[in-house]
Image: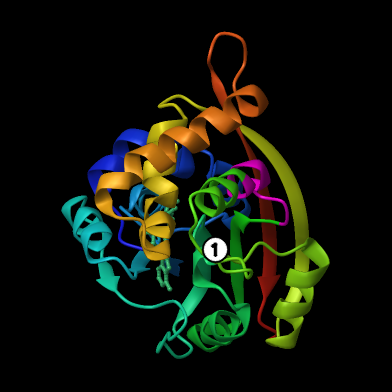
Amino acid sequence: MAWDPQAYAAHAAFVPALGNAAFELLGAVAGERVLDLGCGDGVLTSRIAAEGAEVVGIDADPAMVAAAVEKGVNARLGDGRRLTFAGEFDAVFSNAALHWMGDPAPVVAGVFRALKPGGRFVGEFGGHGNIAAIRVAVRAVLAARGYRVPAAEENYYPTAPEYRVALEAGGFVVDGCWIVPRPTPIASGMAAWLQTFRGGFIDAIGVPAAERAQVIEDTRAMLRPILADGAGNWTADYVRLRFAAHKPE
Ligand SMILES: C[S@@+](CC[C@H](N)C(=O)[O-])C[C@H]1O[C@@H](n2cnc3c(N)ncnc32)[C@H](O)[C@@H]1O
């Protein structure tokens, strides 16, 4: 899906802000080379650079890459499923991006190739059950309006054992792999969240632009009794998968 850096900065600033645990787990040190995979608009990439590391950001969305470059990040357009780096990074980091890349095998293989022997692969992304209520509601609203919703999920939200197997199949030694439930306050409200994170899915189903706002409103109304409190404050049912692995020496 196409990302809008302005909407991302306005409605999704919590994504890099809540990436702090993964950032700490990376523990970037001065002088090392780090790849930030799915760097987005470069907020966390800049934080890694501020530790003194030499960071390259890769992202598949041209507008997000441009926003990262504007922040002074060495960001490039690239697909995480087709990485071409070879033995050049001390660490690969990724926050909130791997679930967008689908099948883990080509991603894990490309990261493994990109790392030096002993290099770390550390990050966090959507785990099993992530935003389950929201995903079900979007599907239910689209189906009720007569759209054909694919049975298969568009994103990859594995369990911890599943992702451990994927990392080990790619040659990694897994140092930790955890599911972390993370109920997340959505200050901008559910309509803005749906627009930012599910607009691409709704468009891909074939919903005309003129109907999109109504789909979002119906979904918001369905979710209100589940995810909003009495005062109308929203909390989304985020679940993260956090991991640390390394390439054998
Ligand atoms: C929710 S944003 C997270 C951005 C950033 N890591 C952060 O913490 O704010 C997800 C990012 O993953 C990128 N992405 C999705 N699929 C990708 C792929 N196949 N290769 C590279 N980047 C991808 C998107 O373009 C988007 O910028």
Q: Residue furthest top?
A: 231
**Horizontal and vertical percent position of residue 90:** 51, 74
In the image, 15 versus 92, the foreground residue is 15
**Horizontal and vertical percent position of residue 134:** 59, 43
Is residue 124 shown left or right of residue 12?
Answer: right
Circle 1 crowding by C-alpha within 10 Å: few under 14, some 14–19, many from 20: some
Residue range (magenta): 128-136
Is residue 80 shown left or right of residue 64?
Answer: right
Q: Does the residue labelled 1 lie within 8 Å of ligand 1?
A: no
Q: In which quarter of the image is the N terminus?
A: bottom left
In the image, 13 versus 117, the foreground residue is 13
Residue 207, quarter of picture:
bottom left
**Residue at (83%, 68%) from the top-left corner?**
161
Say above or below: 84 vs 218.
Answer: below
Is residue 199 shown left or right of residue 167?
Answer: left
Q: Quadrant of the C terminus?
A: bottom right
Question: Tag 1, which secondary structure?
Answer: loop
Residue 69 visible to the viewer? yes
- Check disc 1 and report the residue beneath it: 149
**Residue at (66%, 81%) from the top-left corner?**
247
